Amino acid sequence: VVLCPAWAVNGLLGPGRHQWQSPEPGKPLAVYFVLTGPVAVDFDMVTSFTPPTTGLPVTLRASGSVLVRVADPGMLIAQFVGLPFDRVNDGLKASVATSVERLLGKVLPRKVALAGTPTMVTDPAMRPSLIEELTSYNPGIGAVYGLQFVRFVSLEVAQVGPDLQPIDVGGW
């Protein structure tokens, strides 16, 4: 529980029974319950680029999910205290998904350009090394403060056509 008297984070309480006295009893008190366990966040992105080695346009679709958790409840709530909390959970998930998608949008084209083939990122045998590289960059770093990336749950990368459906890349 994060306690916020007068719209400022003032106390953190863990599980159990507690007695807490507000330092400013005349001011409003907001109490926020924060889940600190891991939560799965889905992502789905499409990126198109032309590798300089082949000159042929490539469109990749990456989707999957990551686990994140709240590492610092006080810092997380400090960003939102006083704002309407109607859809904050959706906003936090969107922030994480955008961070992961941004990272994929940088790493996937670079790996394809260096290898000269999309197989470098679409081949299931390459998935463990791709996930290891993405994890080393901390995919959640661009998300809201107070959240921590835990691990990838799943990651699928496929070369897609104009209809965003996977295509056979046997000719590469």
Image (cartoon, rainbow, N blue to C red):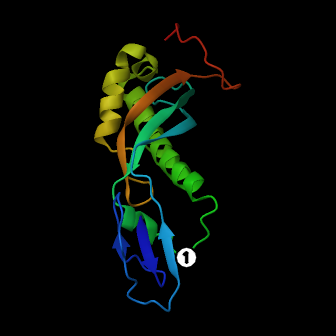
Q: Position of residue 139 (x, y in %)?
A: 39, 44
Please count the marks in the image.
Answer: 1
Disc 1 crowd rating (10 Å Cα; few below 14, some 14-19, many 20+) is few
Residue 1 higher or lower than 148, as above or below: below
Q: Is residue 109 left or right of residue 15?
A: right
Residue beneath label 1, please?
82
Specify the farthest residue to the right: 163
Residue 31 higher or lower than 22, as above or below: above
Specify the farthest residue to the bottom: 26
**Observer-nearest of 19 and 77:** 19
**What residue is shown at x 49% (from left), y 24% (from top)?**
156
Q: Quadrant of the N terminus?
A: bottom left
Residue 105 visible in the displayed image: yes
Residue 140 visible in the displayed image: no
Q: Is residue 130 left or right of residue 7?
A: left
Q: Is residue 112 left or right of residue 163?
A: left
**Observer-nearest of 89 and 11:** 11
**What residue is shown at x 57% (from left), y 59% (from top)?**
88
Badge 1 amino acid: Gly
**Observer-nearest of 101 and 93:** 93
Q: Position of residue 67 (x, y in %)?
A: 42, 39
Q: Position of residue 129 (x, y in %)?
A: 31, 25
**What residue is shown at x 36% (from left), y 14% (from top)?**
125
Q: Position of residue 54 (x, y in %)?
A: 48, 23
